[in-house]
């Protein structure tokens, strides 16, 4: 009985489908609008899409992320815990710390450039110039003159007389080099105490004749104990944040 009912409903549904209005879509080619206003808007949209696609690279280069992730990697190697904490956890913590450190820069960009531009108080070019100023001040504060001079020597460009004459791309490259040096310096200072523990444990095991016992296996609990007793993560996080506020 059920099968007979279904066979009767199929032709009825097909007949009803004939009365449905099927939407249609038509495409047409025509001359584009070449007004300067339209071209300017299209260029602005293209620029914004480019910025969004380069956002990860920008975050890795012109913010505090580089120094933080390098120091975290040194700490993990010094503790000898292999993959603990996981790389994803360290990267997430570095990102959140970057947001906290870069918050004043982001607020300045929003107040001086983004909001006036959205309110149509300033043009796109002026907004772009004002957005660069807080970021340039931050990079200038943590960039060594030696690193900036290196890139000018490589590019054989004329030395600038003022900070305003330094291109942002040149400043960003010098800033990354300075951050790498600073991160490695902090990592070395953190590595020294743990290295001393490894040397002491290795000497004790050698004196006891336990040459077959890996020193790292014995020293790791002592290094973890020392790191926990001094509240290492809190101390390290506070020191890194303060290094950008000096």
Image (spheres, rainbow, N blue to C red):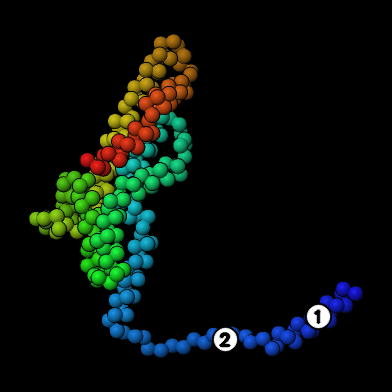
In space, the residues marked 2 and 1 are separated at their CA atoms by 28 Å
Please state the horizontal and vertical placement of residue 108, each as a whole percent of the image: 26, 56
Q: Quadrant of residue 183?
A: top left
Task: Using a 10 Å C-alpha cutoff, classify the residue at mark 2 as few (fewer than 14 neighbours), some (14 to 19) or many (20 or more).
Answer: few
Decide which of 176, 117 is in the foreground and name it: 117
**In the current view of this chain or complex, which residue is farthest to the top?**
208
Please state the horizontal and vertical placement of residue 201, each as a whole percent of the image: 40, 18
Residue, disc 2: 24
Task: Using a 10 Å C-alpha cutoff, classify the residue at mark 1 as few (fewer than 14 neighbours), some (14 to 19) or many (20 or more).
Answer: few
The answer to whether 180 is drawn above or below residue 24 in the figure is above
The answer to whether 221 is drawn above or below residue 106 in the figure is above
Q: Quadrant of residue 170?
A: bottom left
Decide which of 147, 54 is in the foreground and name it: 54
Residue, disc 1: 9
- Tag 1 or tag 2, which sits nearer the N-term? 1
Please state the horizontal and vertical placement of residue 71, each as a whole percent of the image: 34, 38
The C terminus appears in which quarter of the rendering?
A: top left
- Say which element carries label 1: helix
The N terminus appears in which quarter of the rendering?
A: bottom right
The answer to whether 57 is drawn above or below residue 212 in the figure is below
Residue 238, can we see it? yes
Decide which of 130, 52 is in the foreground and name it: 130
Q: What residue is rendered at 32% in x and 30% in y?
A: 190
Q: What residue is rendered at 31% in x and 27% in y?
A: 192
The answer to whether 141 is drawn above or below residue 116 in the figure is above
């Amino acid at each position: 009985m059920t099968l007979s009912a279904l066979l009767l409903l199929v032709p009825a549904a097909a007949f009803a489908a004939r009365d449905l209005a099927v939407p249609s879509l038509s495409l047409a080619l025509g001359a584009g609008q070449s007004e300067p206003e339209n071209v300017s808007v299209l260029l602005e949209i293209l620029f914004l899409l480019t910025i969004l696609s380069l956002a990860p690279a920008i975050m890795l280069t012109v913010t505090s992320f580089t120094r933080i992730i390098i120091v975290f990697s040194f700490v993990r190697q010094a503790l000898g815990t292999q993959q603990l904490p996981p790389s994803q956890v360290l990267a997430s913590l570095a990102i959140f710390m970057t947001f906290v450190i870069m918050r004043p820069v982001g607020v300045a960009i929003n107040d001086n450039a983004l909001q006036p531009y959205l309110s149509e108080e300033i043009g796109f070019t002026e907004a772009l110039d004002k957005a660069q100023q807080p970021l340039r001040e931050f990079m200038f504060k943590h960039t060594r003159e030696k690193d900036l001079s290196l890139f000018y020597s490589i590019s054989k460009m004329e030395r600038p007389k003022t900070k305003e004459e330094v291109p942002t791309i040149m400043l960003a490259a010098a800033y990354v080099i300075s951050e790498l040096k600073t991160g490695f310096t902090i990592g070395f200072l953190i590595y020294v105490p743990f290295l001393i523990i490894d040397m002491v444990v290795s000497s004790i095991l050698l004196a006891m004749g336990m040459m077959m016992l890996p020193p790292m296996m014995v020293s790791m609990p002592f290094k973890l104990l020392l790191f926990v007793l001094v509240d290492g993560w809190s101390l390290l996080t506070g020191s890194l944040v303060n290094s950008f506020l000096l």
